[in-house]
Amino acid sequence: MNDNTFFRSYKLVPEVKRPFLYSSLIAMVATLIRMVGPQLISRGIDNGVLKADYNYLLEQSFYYFITLIALYFVASKALLSIGLVGELYVKRVREKLFRHLSSLDINYFEKNKTGVLVARMTSDMQSLNEFAREGASSIITALLTIFGATIAVFLVDVRLAFLSFLILPLLGIATKIFRNYADKAYWSVREWIGQVLSSLQEGISGVRIIQAYSDETSQLDNFKKVNNEHFKANMQSAKNIAFYFPFLEITRVTSIAIVIWFAAQRINQGTLSVGELVALLFYLNYFFDPLIMLSFNYDLLRSAGSSMKKVFSILDEEPVLSNTGITTPDMENNNVIEFNKVNFSYGRERVLHDVSFSINKGETIAIVGETGAGKSTIAKLILRFYLPNEGDVNFYGEPSKDVTQKWARKNIAYVPQESFLFRGSIKNNLIYSNPEGIDLEKELLEIGVLDWFERYENGLDQEVGERGANISAGERQFIALLRAVLAKREIIVFDEATANLDIESENSILDATDTLLAYQTSIIIAHRLETIINAEKIMVMHNGKLVGFDNHENLLRNNEIYQDLFSAWKLVN
């Protein structure tokens, strides 16, 4: 974890700073207690064993026993405290990441694979969890012990301290080399974990298509390629550890051997006691053992650091639309939506060309056209998922770039072609956007669809599986459409919203919701023209251009493209 990532991580969750300092203080006290032990042993040897003063030896042993008990309780408190701080930190980071993801613009999710984003919330968070649970306390304890042992070695004997640390520059060089290679390896591991999860998610989501086309072998080959790259990244990490750990052990043994060699001469000269040598050896072990512990935990640290870099790569993404707009439109204006010479492209190729139209309050407007004509793009601009590249999209007279995202979410409802239901009951899905302001059964009874839910064993309390998997596509679409209508937004957009409904169900729900839609401004996108014949006006799109905007009768008389669409519809009915 480089310095920049470390300090950003430290500042990311300010509420854990005070508990962290408190935990570190307890760990420092535990380290001080740990450093007392070798001194008691040293005195016991020099003044007890060598002088045959067994009462003094017994006294020092008692003090040592008390020290061990104190160390047990203080160290346990420190480990528990640090662990709690770590878990709280991960909890807050996960919440911040989810909140930020929810605020990002739609185009961010269209550019990034779902599996990779899921990896940020699962695999990377798991990496942070492992570090918080196992690594953080070990690393903090190890660093404090190394610091305390270094001071203690110099307090025992300065000359032997310098001799024992002569080999440390070589250890520093090896550590630098190890860090350089390890950082790259751990970053690669985290990156390929995301790719593995993405490939896995795609394979599971598309399993019906894969099996229908008997493409299991090809999909497996693709997964093997990604999985193999993940394997290579993990093996590179393992090679780095295999190089570094033996070198660290050799350094410790060499340093201790140097101390014993020169200490033996000092003892012979009478300038060093046996007890001081024993204390010195204890402190050297206190110095090197935590280094080994750090090395074993280095993979957790680097993995957590790489995960935090991935997290910051998302947190650094700015939600342009959420940060754009400070105006709340005056909704008394009769002109609800207006496109004024709007041009738009998702990339290089323009998908809308100089589109201009206006929609008044309470109107039901339909949009028709062949696939790729620009219908859904208009819907996305109305939903303020995007801003136009050129021209203006106005809401109640205010340009969309000036309108707050909060206003758009509170006043525009949306029913996509691919309906999405959340895990939970049908009731919770229906009142999703209006949980407190609706008497659901009364509303459903008034619009004549309450008995529709009697088909389910538990009625409105029927549980819905993940993405509504345990009910049919048509039923999911029916519930999703009702959800949008019951939200009672001022503007409602149906993007192929009845595509999965049969004609009878489609007519039934549209008739049933007429009273609820009466005061709303509705935009309906559909291929099936029977859905939109009764709209006040119909927009005809062709190759990204608006080529007609009138009622059904006038378009049928005067618009060739609409005539072709209508003729094609009649042929399939």
Image: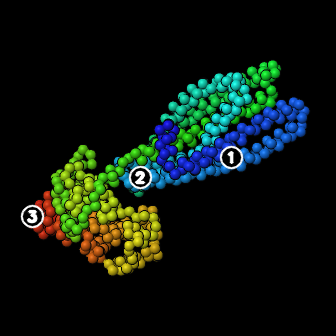
Residue plotted at (89% across, 39% down) = 55
Q: Position of residue 157 (x, y in %)?
A: 72, 26
- Tell me whether the residue at label 2 lies in contact with that at label 1, contact meaning CB atoms closer than 8 angstroms: no
Q: Decide which of tag 3 and tag 2 comes sooner along the chain.
A: 2
Q: Position of residue 233 (x, y in %)?
A: 50, 37
Query: Which residue in the structure is indicated by mark 1?
Result: 75
Residue plotted at (24% across, 66% down) = 331
Q: Does residue 550 appear in this view?
A: yes
- The mark found on residue 461 in the picture is none
Q: CA distance from mark 3 to mark 1?
A: 86 Å
Quadrant in the picture for the C terminus: bottom left
Q: Report the mark closest to the observer, 3 or 2.
A: 2
Q: CA distance from mark 2 to mark 1?
A: 37 Å
Q: Give the SS element for disc 1.
A: helix
Query: Which residue in the structure is indicated by mark 2?
Result: 100
Q: Report the mark closest to the observer, 2 or 1.
A: 1
Q: Decide which of tag 2 and tag 1 comes sooner along the chain.
A: 1
Q: Amino acid at mark 2?
A: His
Circle 2 residues within 10 Å: few <14, some 14–19, many ≥20: some
183 w.r.t. 483: above or below: above
Circle 3 residues within 10 Å: few <14, some 14–19, many ≥20: few
Q: Amino acid at mark 3?
A: Asn
Q: Does residue 220 appear in this view?
A: no
228 w.r.t. 120: above or below: above
- Most foreground residue, 494 or 91: 91
Q: How is the image coloured?
A: rainbow
Query: Which residue in the structure is indicated by mark 3?
Result: 558
> Residue 61, located in which quarter of the rendered image?
top right
